[in-house]
Image (tube, helix red, strand yellow):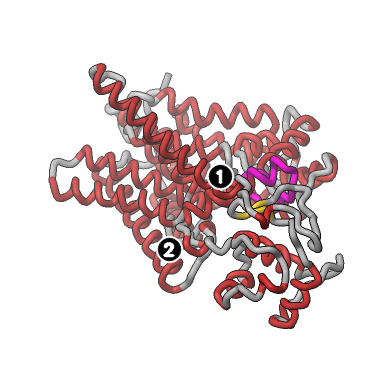
Amino acid sequence: MMMGAVPTSVPQLVLLGNFFAEGNFKTKWLRLKNNRVFWAASSVFWIYLIGLLWAGDLKAGWADVQIKIPLGWLPLILFSAEPLTKKEWQFALYCFLVGCFGNTVWCVLYSFVLHHAEAGRETSRFMSHIRLGLYLNMAIACCVYFFTQTKRIGLKLLFAALSIYFLAIMFVLGMASGIAVFCILFFVALCVLVYKQKLWVKISATIFLIVFIGAVANYILKIKNEQLSVKASENNTIQNGYVYLDTLGQKENGNLVWINLQMPELQREWKRKFPADSFNFLPNEHNINRFQVLVRYMTSKGLNKDSANMAQLSEKDFFNIQHNIPNYQYTQWNFLRKRVYELVNDYDAFVHRRWVNGHSFTMRIYFWQAAVHVIKKDFLFGVGTGNLQQSLNAAYDDIHSPLNQDWRKRPHNQFLSVTVSLGIFGLLIFIFGIAYPAFILRKQVPKLFWAFLLIALLSFFPEDTLDTQAGVTFYAFFNTLFLSIGFFSRNKQFNPHLPPQPTR
């Protein structure tokens, strides 16, 4: 599942083919018929299939259902098959760790050796950087599990090294969301570990957490202040003979961007140096972004925006500007520093009501507004499977969203996405399909299940996790694997030729 769409789909097709090749469907049906855990877990898929009944766009609806097929047939296969042995399901996790390692090695080679990726989102080669962060957090949880299970020193060192490696990769590749999920996982795990410990252990853990949170907050605030606190500089005061356009407070490295401009000079000098990449200020021109990047870049160096200061730029500076790098320090930062810089700018743009298109953090507010607007109109049953984007497009127009057409996306919240498509009834079934099996099998599922469930639920709030192949495979595979282990552990006297005891 870690190496792209085809390597993810092929094993699933093999499992499905094996399911039909085995036959013995009567026994399989007996195993499933009274299995409430199976029906609850697979209901997450069935509600999308039922949602086709009132879908206006069946083509888009079927496409949506196809993505979510693993939510239906993975439970069908694992709950109707012979129970996996401990060695078998642990081997599956070993393969997962190998896949994570291979994926990240290629990402590093691609980003730092074969190419020079500037943005963190460009570093993940087989899935979005957000989905990769989920997988790597799950890989860390698996490493911790195997570390506690084995008594061999060599294996303990291997799993410890792997967990450190996966965490380091998230820092190196700037996976801010993945690091945030790890911090929450770490916090929850620490609380569980110290809950029954002595008082001095609880106090030590509390101090550690306070120091850790303080260090993270200090790191973010330091970048925020460096970027947004206006410096006491001559270049940040209005000078005679220059244009002043600063009505929105945009800054680079503490310098005001739209102040002290000589726009005709910049246009003339840039066109002289790069005639094929020139810009002007007419509305019908499409290269105005070059002007914006040039102004931000010169501002980041503390320069007035005129021909004399433009002459101070080096060839490396011009190269950076032509590659849409708005800050001269940007290429020196690691991916995490770049991501925090972007989030700080997103925050500042939202506060000052500047241009929000392309700012992933603040755009979500407008995604959610559009989703809530649709939900109010189709509260009970939603707009139907596959009609989500079409309905949102109309909502963006209704609420006069500032987002451009290209940025009018899905809600980026799984609970909102479900409610838009299937209404409040669909949302209740969706929550039931997640919560009921976990509650029933809470004493039998492996402890790894709780780490997975927390990772999955955390991903549901800022992302439509189940609307992509990587996301739905992540949820369907681990959820079904751990629930089936817990179910068969609960039914130890299970006779493969008879239906299992019903869960209560």
Residue drawn 30% across and 30% down?
489
Point out the stretch of residues depicted in magenta: 347-363
Residue 153: image location, x then y, percent: 13, 46
Q: Disc 2 designates what residue?
A: 107
Residue drawn 14% across and 41% down?
151
Q: Disc 1 designates what residue?
A: 224
Mark 2, mark 1: which one is toward the viewer?
A: 1
Residue 375: image location, x then y, percent: 74, 32
Q: Earlier in the sequence, mark 2 or mark 1?
A: 2
In this rendered view, identify the residue nearer to me: 197 or 392: 197
Instruction: Give the crowd class for mark 2: few <14, some 14-19, many >=20 residues within 10 Å.
Output: many
Circle 1: residue type: Lys
Say which mark, if any, is on residue 378.
none
Q: Quadrant of residue 253?
A: bottom right
In the image, taking residue 170 as reference, residue 225 lies left or right, namely right
In the image, taking residue 320 as reference, residue 12 lies left or right, namely left
